[in-house]
């Protein structure tokens, strides 16, 4: 087994430390870029993230497990680095341009099956060689998997922070990948062991250049037959302005936010609510202002308007692309623009409003779902005047309400009703939800008369259309359609509507996945959580009775991966619901987790004997986290607690990883086994927890599930007979 | 069934009923429970050896073995006998202004009892009603509405016509034909809103039974039909020619989708073809595309594109060219081609003024083609 000589590159010992650090840095940076691009390409949500992450982890795990069979040696380290750098533009270009080959329109909806196929195909290109790279790096370190794991985790922590805070605010996704690739190439070239093949070296040097300069042309190609007018990557997403004829449409993450010539959505978002009260003096508009929301609200005489927008770039870009008469509203003295998270604004403002107009997309992501929960509605109710009105709109169908849609609408309505005594839903291709403590009206004549009294000049919300739309029978049948389905309340801890919205998305496609989502949406919560628990129990029982000691000690690594990813998602979701938009904070949270992993595994590498007791201690710490989550979930945890919790969980996980590896890795072929199992467990966690358990069962049952599984693992480990282990090459410092 | 029970049933089925609630509410007992799929023998098919059949209803001419369904998903070969599964199985029911279909030259200002079953024989990526058209009948909740009851409902609802619409009426051909026959015998008119993807023989039969047909012409090149509609343009054009030569009133809708079918030359060719094959008096509606179904993230159609399309069609000699889905636009009005005065003024789905007298312009007596009474 080749063991590297001690440092030749000075006190920092770069030759030893850099490859695994670069591996972690590159791996997480590429993962973030691919996630962002994938998210945009498929107009995604956390389920999309889950799918891509799961595929990424799957191939990484498989790469590690198969490395021995593929005869990956330490000498291939530099070649593998170059291969990853060459394949990363192929992966990104494949994602962006595949629609041309497949005859798919830009932004055309893609079903879960096709999306999974894409995710698997694309991540194979990059993640599989990264998995091989890990094993190669371990072998370059003489089999010291713990060291590589530790440095890789620290590299990942640094990569996450650098990408989010230094690169994304200034560069496009492709440029970020290009720059990171260039840095990795430099590191490998100057500090890596062994010279890569000349063609690989040249290819790897060319790849970042392609990424840097290929971004804009490929984006234009992507949008054909429409014309891409402008594009920006901001920390909040990808903004793209697309021209069609004389009008422009602004897309955020490939979802249209507004078209310059179409006022339908803005009119609906504003007027149904503002016409409810004779003099709406103080109005709060959350989102969609640049798309006409402000303009429509200002048509109502008098009063002031607070407009909350998360991404300042949306306003800046709008000022560039819209005619001056449309953007003049931003400077109107009646308007105050606040650049921040709407939920955080609402929680902190002392003002009281006559109307709060929620003008955001439907709750198709967990991030957006925060604006449709019981807690948000309660927060809105506190800031509303006694007869104030809250409104939002949800895409729907005018002629037919399917049971799945009815369930979704019913959940929204019952959540509103839990806070407001009066609710009303406007029928149509969009359903406008209205809520108040005072009576509401869906009388077409009364609303039309009020609109005419105020001299509103509107295209869609007008007498001639309202009479058909607000026909009492339509209103009544919509109400009864909604009533026909059982309603569950959407909360921060059980973000149901996010799942229902995804069921509606899956219903666009006739594959089995839409039926599965539909089936699960009806499933009771008990079995949803109970079955995996029983399954986990059976697996550990089987292992206890049949498996070798080595296998038994490695198996919990899969659970570590599963729990690790679940805990990450869990904390991020909780952080978002408590503290508003957490884009930067998400990176920071994950960096704390990775840093914990790195430091935990580093500390656990001390040359003392690895023991089952040490493993048990780590498992106890891993079990404590969901236990504490169960206890403290109902309370508002301070930010620092969440950061520390992730760090400590990461540290316990890192220590566990090293202990398990030290107890089991005796042969060269085992170098990738632990890492592979960890990633495969993470794959399962990403696929199941973020997409099904958290939205359907909620945070508390998911914490209980994690607690149960980890308790079983603890009992399992403590039931194994104690046997001293020999120090292996792994423990060599 | 008690009225309350019906409400629960119909609400579960997601049905929405439109205007004039009172008469409807008092006669809802006519409905029966939502039931199983129908097994009424279909028309327009041929039996083949080995219990195979070939459907001859639409240009797909599906050849099916036992227990197989056609492309539409609502017609099934049961032991060598072809069945329609959606006879009287209604999943969407409204009372809509006829302008909403849109028909602008057919009984303006009236309502039409509008109904649909599940299923469609094409698969447009921009379908407005995909939740009923792109599914099988067992995936939606249906109520039984036999032809006689449909006619009853329309009469009690004071709707002078029944519209077969929303999904694709061709796939519920048998139900449509029987309902049209019953309702015509009771003084009602029948209108069909279709993609026009139907074989000549059943179409000829249909034209004898109904009073007006609106064809959605989705584009004017075969590539567009193949890629975005999953059908062929040729049979649709043949259908339009056949309807234009019949005594049944014809209107055409062209949904303009930015970047996909808004090319001025294509619209010019389409307009010329219409003038030649259907005559200059056929009303043509350029409708604004609102993002839907698989294309829900495309931009909606710019107004200037619609106006440009309209000016091309007018310049090619079509006399009645409208813009749809843009309420309040002047191109919603019917203008007398002789004196240039507005003879029917519309906003949205409402007729504000009707200056026609016996089908003629009140100002210059020029005849305006259509079915006005």
Image: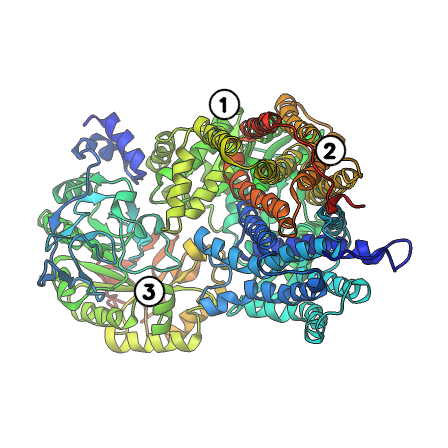
- Up/down of A25 relative to A398, above or below: below
Q: Is residue B110 visible?
A: yes
Residue tagged 2: A648
| Colour scheme | rainbow
Q: Nearer the viewer, residue A454 or B211?
A: B211
Q: Residue at x 16, y 68 (%)?
A: B200
Q: Residue at x 37, y 31 (%)?
A: A485
- Residue B214: horizontal and vertical position, in percent? 26, 61
Classify mark 3: helix, strand or loop.
loop
Q: Which mark is residue B208?
A: none
Given the image, what chain letter belongs to the residue carrying mark 3?
Answer: B
Tell me whether the residue at label 3 lies in contact with that at label 1, contact meaning CB atoms closer than 8 angstroms.
Answer: no
Classify mark 1: helix, strand or loop.
loop
- Up/down of B361 relative to A156, above or below: below
- Residue B66: horizontal and vertical position, in percent? 15, 55
Q: Are marks 2 and 3 in one subunit?
A: no
| Residue A336 appears left or right of A696 | right
Q: Nearer the viewer, mark 2 or mark 1?
A: 2
Q: Residue furthest right?
A: A11
| Residue A178 appears left or right of B355 | right
Mark 1 burial class by Cα count in 10 Å: few <14, some 14-19, many 20+: few
Q: Nearer the viewer, mark 2 or mark 3?
A: 2
Residue tagged 3: B230
Q: CA distance from mark 2 to mark 3?
A: 56 Å
Residue tagged 1: A421
- Residue A628: horizontal and vertical position, in percent? 66, 24
| Residue B251 appears left or right of A33 | left
Given the image, what chain letter belongs to the residue carrying mark 2?
Answer: A
Residue A404, by quadrant, is top left
Tell me whether the residue at label 2 lies in contact with that at label 3, contact meaning CB atoms closer than 8 angstroms.
Answer: no
Q: CA distance from mark 3 to mark 1?
A: 48 Å
- Residue A558: horizontal and vertical position, in percent? 58, 40
């Amino acid at each position: 087994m080749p063991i590297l000589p001690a440092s030749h590159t000075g006190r920092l010992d770069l030759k030893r430390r850099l490859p695994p650090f670069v591996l972690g840095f590159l791996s997480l940076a590429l993962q973030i870029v691919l996630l962002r691009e994938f998210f945009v390409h498929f107009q995604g949500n956390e389920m999309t993230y889950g799918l891509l992450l799961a595929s990424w982890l799957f191939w990484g795990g498989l790469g590690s497990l198969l490395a021995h069979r593929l005869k990956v040696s330490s000498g291939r380290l530099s070649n593998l680095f170059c291969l990853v750098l060459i394949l990363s533009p192929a992966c990104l270009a494949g994602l962006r341009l595949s629609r041309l080959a497949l005859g798919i329109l830009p932004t055309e909806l893609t079903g879960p099956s096709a999306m999974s196929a894409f995710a698997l195909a694309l991540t194979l290109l990059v993640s599989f060689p990264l998995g091989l790279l890990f094993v190669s790096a371990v072998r370059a370190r003489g089999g010291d998997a713990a060291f590589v794991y530790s440095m890789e985790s620290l590299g990942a922590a640094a990569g996450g922070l650098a990408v989010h805070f230094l690169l994304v605010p200034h560069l496009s996704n492709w440029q970020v990948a290009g720059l990171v690739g260039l840095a990795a190439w430099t590191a490998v070239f100057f500090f890596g062991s062994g010279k890569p093949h000349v063609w690989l070296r040249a290819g790897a040097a060319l790849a970042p250049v392609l990424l840097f300069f290929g971004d804009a042309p490929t984006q234009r190609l992507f949008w054909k037959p429409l014309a891409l007018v402008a594009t920006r990557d901001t920390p909040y997403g990808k903004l793209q302005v697309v021209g069609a004829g004389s009008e422009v449409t602004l897309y955020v993450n490939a979802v249209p936010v507004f078209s310059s010539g179409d006022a339908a959505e803005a009119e609906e978002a504003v007027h149904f609510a503002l016409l409810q009260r004779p003099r709406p003096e103080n109005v709060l508009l959350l989102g969609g202002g640049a798309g006409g929301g402000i303009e429509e609200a200002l048509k109502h005489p008098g009063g002031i308007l607070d407009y909350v927008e998360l991404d300042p770039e949306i306003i800046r870009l709008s000022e560039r692309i819209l005619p001056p008469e449309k953007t003049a509203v931003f400077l109107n003295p009646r308007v105050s623009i606040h650049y921040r998270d709407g939920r955080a604004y609402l929680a902190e403002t002392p003002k009281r409003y006559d109307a709060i107009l929620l003008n955001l997309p439907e709750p198709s992501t967990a991030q957006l779902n925060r604006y449709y929960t019981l807690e948000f509605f309660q927060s809105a109710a506190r800031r509303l005047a006694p007869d104030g009105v809250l409104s939002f709109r949800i895409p729907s169908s005018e002629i037919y309400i399917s049971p799945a849609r009815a369930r979704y609408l019913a959940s929204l309505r019952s959540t509103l009703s839990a806070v407001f005594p009066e609710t009303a839903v406007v029928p149509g291709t969009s359903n406008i939800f209205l809520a108040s403590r005072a009576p509401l009206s869906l009388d077409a004549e009364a609303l039309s008369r009020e609109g005419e009294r105020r001299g509103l000049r509107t295209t869609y919300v007008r007498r001639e259309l309202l009479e058909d739309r607000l026909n009492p029978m339509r209103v009544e049948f919509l109400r009864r359609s909604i009533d026909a389905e059982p309603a569950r309340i959407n909360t921060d801890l059980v973000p149901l509507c996010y799942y229902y919205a995804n069921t509606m998305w899956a219903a666009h496609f006739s594959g089995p996945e839409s039926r599965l989502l539909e089936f699960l949406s009806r499933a009771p919560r008990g079995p949803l959580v109970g079955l995996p628990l029983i399954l986990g129990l059976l697996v550990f029982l089987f292992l206890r009775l049949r498996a070798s000691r080595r296998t038994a000690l490695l198996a919990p690594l899969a659970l570590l991966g599963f729990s690790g990813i679940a805990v990450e998602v869990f904390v991020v979701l909780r952080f978002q619901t408590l503290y508003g938009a957490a884009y930067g904070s998400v990176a920071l949270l994950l960096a704390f987790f990775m840093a914990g992993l790195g430091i935990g595994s580093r500390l656990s590498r001390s040359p003392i004997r690895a023991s089952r007791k040490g493993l048990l201690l780590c498992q106890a710490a891993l079990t404590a986290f969901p236990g504490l989550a169960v206890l403290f979930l109902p309370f508002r945890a301070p930010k620092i607690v969440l950061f520390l919790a992730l760090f400590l969980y990461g540290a316990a996980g890192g220590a566990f990883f090293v202990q398990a590896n030290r107890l089991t890795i005796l042969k060269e072929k085992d170098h990738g086994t632990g890492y592979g199992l960890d990633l495969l467990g993470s794959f399962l966690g990403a696929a199941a927890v973020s997409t099904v358990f958290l939205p359907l069962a909620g945070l508390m049952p998911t914490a209980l599930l994690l607690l149960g599984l980890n308790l079983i693992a603890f009992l399992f480990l403590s039931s194994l007979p104690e046997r001293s282990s020999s120090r292996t090459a792994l423990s060599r410092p | 069934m008690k009225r309350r029970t019906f409400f629960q049933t119909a609400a579960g089925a997601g049905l929405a009923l439109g205007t004039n609630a009172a008469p409807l509410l008092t006669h809802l007992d006519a409905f029966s429970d939502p039931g199983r799929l129908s097994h009424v023998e279909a028309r327009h098919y041929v039996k083949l050896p080995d219990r195979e059949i070939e459907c001859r209803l639409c240009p797909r001419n599906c050849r099916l073995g036992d227990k197989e369904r056609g492309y539409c998903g609502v017609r099934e070969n049961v032991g060598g006998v072809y069945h329609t599964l959606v006879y009287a199985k209604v999943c969407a029911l409204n009372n809509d202004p006829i302008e909403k279909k849109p028909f602008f030259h057919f009984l303006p200002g009236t309502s039409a009892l509008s109904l649909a079953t599940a299923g469609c024989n094409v698969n447009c990526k921009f379908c407005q009603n995909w939740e009923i058209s792109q599914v099988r009948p067992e995936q939606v909740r249906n109520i039984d509405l036999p032809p006689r009851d449909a006619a009853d409902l329309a009469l009690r609802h004071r709707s002078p016509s029944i519209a077969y619409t929303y999904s694709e009426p061709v796939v519920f051909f048998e139900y449509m034909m029987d309902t049209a026959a019953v309702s015509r015998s009771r003084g009602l008119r029948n209108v069909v809103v279709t993609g026009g993807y139907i074989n000549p023989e059943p179409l000829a039969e249909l034209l004898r039974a109904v009073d007006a047909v609106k064809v959605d012409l989705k584009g004017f090149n075969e590539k567009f039909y193949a890629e975005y509609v999953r059908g062929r343009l040729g049979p649709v054009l043949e259908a339009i020619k056949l309807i234009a030569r019949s005594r049944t009133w014809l209107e055409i809708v062209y949904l303009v989708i930015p970047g996909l079918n808004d090319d001025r030359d294509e619209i010019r060719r389409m307009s010329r073809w219409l003038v030649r094959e259907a005559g200059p008096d056929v009303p043509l509606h350029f409708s604004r595309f609102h993002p839907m179904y698989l294309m829900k993230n495309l931009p909606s159609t710019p107004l200037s594109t619609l106006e440009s399309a309209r000016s091309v069609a007018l310049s090619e000699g079509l006399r009645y060219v409208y813009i749809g889905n843009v309420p309040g636009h002047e191109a919603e009005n019917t203008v007398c081609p002789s004196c240039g005065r507005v003879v029917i003024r519309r906003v949205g789905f409402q007729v504000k003024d009707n200056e026609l007298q016996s089908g003629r312009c009140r100002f210059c007596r020029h005849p305006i083609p259509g079915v006005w009474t």
